[in-house]
Image (spheres, rainbow, N blue to C red):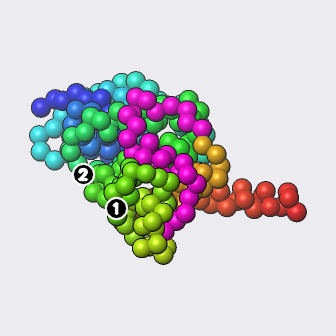
């Protein structure tokens, strides 16, 4: 049975000497895998479309198990992402996180739209740290551990400012913060930004300006939350961490 779907390549796996298995996040069928026969050959008709981040139209044949790719047409290659190693790493974090947390064939057109808009904004030059944070916060709902960010997790007050408690999985007001001696005191807008990232519709994601100090606190909260509640470690994020360390060392050498 032939099926046609729009999809974004979120993983490629070499299979044998000439073939690739493509994992696609699709609007119509959720996450699926298809065999692209001969895709590793330079002159293959699938060579250009069987690459990470490609957004395209895919026709595949499937009876049971994995499908076989019959036709593909590229709709957007996100050229800027693919030509810059840092942007490639941010994009790789996004697709790897989705691949790790989303089950096969679980339908979610909204998730497809989210990934497309994030990659589009990344390709257009929006802040990659902010874009990755947006996805990370939204994917916590897929993991079943979304934090409470619009009110205190303990007394339910909506009056801020709030600190963040990993123990209580979300915001805590100044009166309740003492119940968690390890709560994280943050700038007043940090929890508000986390809530914005959690709720912002995909189509409204654009250029969001965030100070470096604020981004540092956002990263600390999100990384620790994933460590405690999700346990997913991304290969591409390890590379970005190494780049950050090297940049810090270079800046320290200049200052000295």
Residue depicted at x 50% and y 42%: 131
Left/right of residue 181 with respect to residue 29 in the rendered view: right
Residue at image point 18% right, 30% down: 3
Q: Is residue 121 visible?
A: yes
Q: Depth check: give the residue in front, 50 or 90.
A: 90
User: How would you rate the neighbour count of disc 1 (Cα within 10 Å): few for under 14, some for 14-19, many for 20 or more?
Assistant: few
Vertical relation: 190 (above or below) 172: above
Q: Is residue 245 above or below residue 67?
A: below
Left or right placement of residue 163 versus residue 70 in this view: right
Q: Which residue is mark 2?
A: 103
Tell me where the magenta segment starts and ends, as one range: 183-209
Please tell me the numbered disc located at residue 183: none
Q: Please give left or right for residue 186 compared with residue 63 in the image.
A: right
The local crowd at label 2, few if under 14, some if 14 to 19, many if 20 or more residues have their Cα within 10 Å, is: few
Give whichever of discs 1 and 2 has the lower sequence position: 2
Residue 46: x and y, percent?
Answer: 37, 32
Q: Secondary structure at mark 1?
A: loop
The spot of residue 74 in percent (x, y) is: 40, 26
Image position, residue 242 (x, y; %): 62, 60
Q: Nearer the viewer, residue 220 or 153?
A: 153
Q: Is residue 38 magenta?
A: no
x, y percent for residue 11: 38, 46
State the CA–CA distance, disc 1 to disc 2: 35 Å
Of tags 1 and 2, the one toward the viewer is 1
Quadrant assignment for the N terminus: top left
Q: In this rendering, is residue 86 above or below 166? A: above
Q: What mark, if any, has residue 155 been given in the picture? A: 1
* In the foreground, 33 or 120: 120
Outermost right residue: 256
């Amino acid at each position: 049975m032939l099926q046609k779907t729009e999809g974004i390549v979120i993983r490629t796996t070499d299979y044998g000497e000439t073939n690739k298995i493509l994992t696609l996040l699709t609007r119509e069928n959720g996450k699926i895998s298809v065999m692209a026969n001969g895709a590793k050959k330079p002159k293959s008709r699938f060579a250009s479309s069987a690459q990470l981040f490609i957004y395209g139209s895919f026709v595949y044949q499937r009876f049971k198990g994995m499908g076989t790719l019959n036709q593909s047409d590229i709709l957007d290659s996100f050229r800027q992402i693919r030509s810059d190693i840092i942007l490639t790493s941010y994009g790789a974090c996004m697709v790897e996180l989705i691949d790790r947390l989303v089950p096969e064939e679980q339908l979610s057109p909204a998730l497809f739209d989210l990934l497309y808009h994030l990659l589009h904004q990344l390709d257009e030059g929006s802040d990659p740290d902010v874009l990755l944070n947006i996805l990370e916060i939204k994917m916590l709902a897929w993991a079943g551990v979304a934090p409470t960010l619009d009110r205190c997790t303990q007394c339910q007050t909506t009056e801020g400012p709030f600190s963040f408690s990993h123990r209580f999985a979300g915001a805590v007001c100044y009166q309740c913060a003492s119940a968690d001696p390890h709560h994280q005191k943050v700038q007043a807008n940090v929890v508000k930004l986390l809530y914005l990232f959690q709720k912002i519709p995909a189509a409204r994601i654009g250029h969001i300006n965030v100070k470096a100090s604020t981004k540092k606190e956002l990263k600390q909260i999100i990384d620790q939350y994933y460590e405690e509640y999700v346990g997913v470690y991304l290969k591409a994020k390890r590379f970005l961490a190494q780049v950050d360390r090297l940049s810090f060392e270079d800046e320290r050498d200049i200052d000295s």
